[in-house]
Image: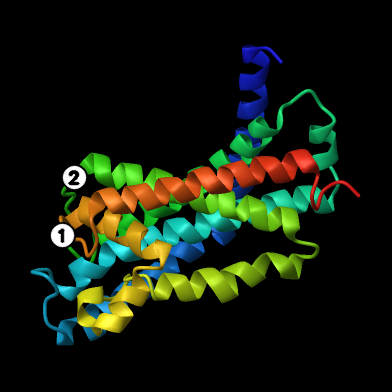
Amino acid sequence: MKFAEQRAAFVTILRKEILRFMRIWVQTVLPAGIIMTLYFVIFGKLIGSQLADIRGLSYMDYIVPGIIIMAIMNNSYANVVSSFYSAKFQRHVEEMLVSPMPGYLIVAGYVAGGIARGTVVGLVVTAVAMFFTDLQVHVWWVACLVVFLTSLLFALGGFINAVYANSFDDISIVPTFVLTPLTYLGGVFYSIDLLPDFWQKVSLGNPILYMVNAFRYGMTGVSDVDLLVAFGIIISFVVALYAFAIYLLRSGTGIRS
């Protein structure tokens, strides 16, 4: 395919993905805003007002970056896993596979749609957060880069989950039993400095910890981990998942019967 044709194919998939989640924004965007508002009220205001500052920040200011990035993770993942599995279920993914469109373009289109939804939800949650705290950005480029890489990573994870899923129930297994526990244990609501030494070391094996803290540094200048280490781990996971997604698409795993 020529470059103009590739661009047209990519834009077509991306436009379809954006229209898909924006058309049902009451189900895809609004719930995240409501759920995160409850987090701000319950954890930030009611519980946080009774807690001491963490690393020079009020509890509300400390958890806001984690809640924002958690919403971005969940929605980037959910958009791709549901959309690509639906394409498998309805069997129109086969039309893309037999077209001249290369596999990396298919992955890029769906993943870009996940990034778009994650970004939109992130902006909504950020707007909500501004009603509860005086939100500042410490380093803009760090915050924006972490948002992009994190949404990219989770969109790729959603794509891989969709490839392996054999039913609609399968697309909820990973979020329920893997992502949710790792997210809540990833330093969203606490600093790992508060944990005993053993559990601090265990926490360092959780990749979500690095995403949460890298974004927290971009927003507040505070982090439990080294920023370069965090970026190294995030980028390594992005490269590994992208290569695996391309392999699965080319091999036809879970797609070709």
Which residue is identified by label 2?
Answer: 139
Taking the spot 11% from the left edge, 76% from the top edge, the residue there is 53
Left or right of 145, for residue 7: right
* Residue that extends furthest to the right in the rendered view of this protein: 257
- Separation of residues labelled 1 and 2 (CA atoms): 16 Å
Which residue is identified by label 1?
Answer: 134
Q: Indicate the quadrant containing the N terminus: top left, top right, bottom left or bottom right.
A: top right
**N-terminal of the two: label 1 or label 2?**
1
Mark 1 neighbour density, 10 Å: few (under 14) some (14–19) many (20 or more): few
Total numbered circles: 2
Taking the spot 28% from the left edge, 55% from the top edge, the residue there is 214
| Residue 11 seen in this snapshot | yes
The image shows residue 40, relative to residue 159, as above or below, that is: below
Q: Amino acid at mark 1?
A: Asp
Q: Amino acid at mark 2?
A: Val
Left or right of 113, for residue 215: left
Mark 2 neighbour density, 10 Å: few (under 14) some (14–19) many (20 or more): some
The image shows residue 206, relative to residue 3, as above or below, that is: below
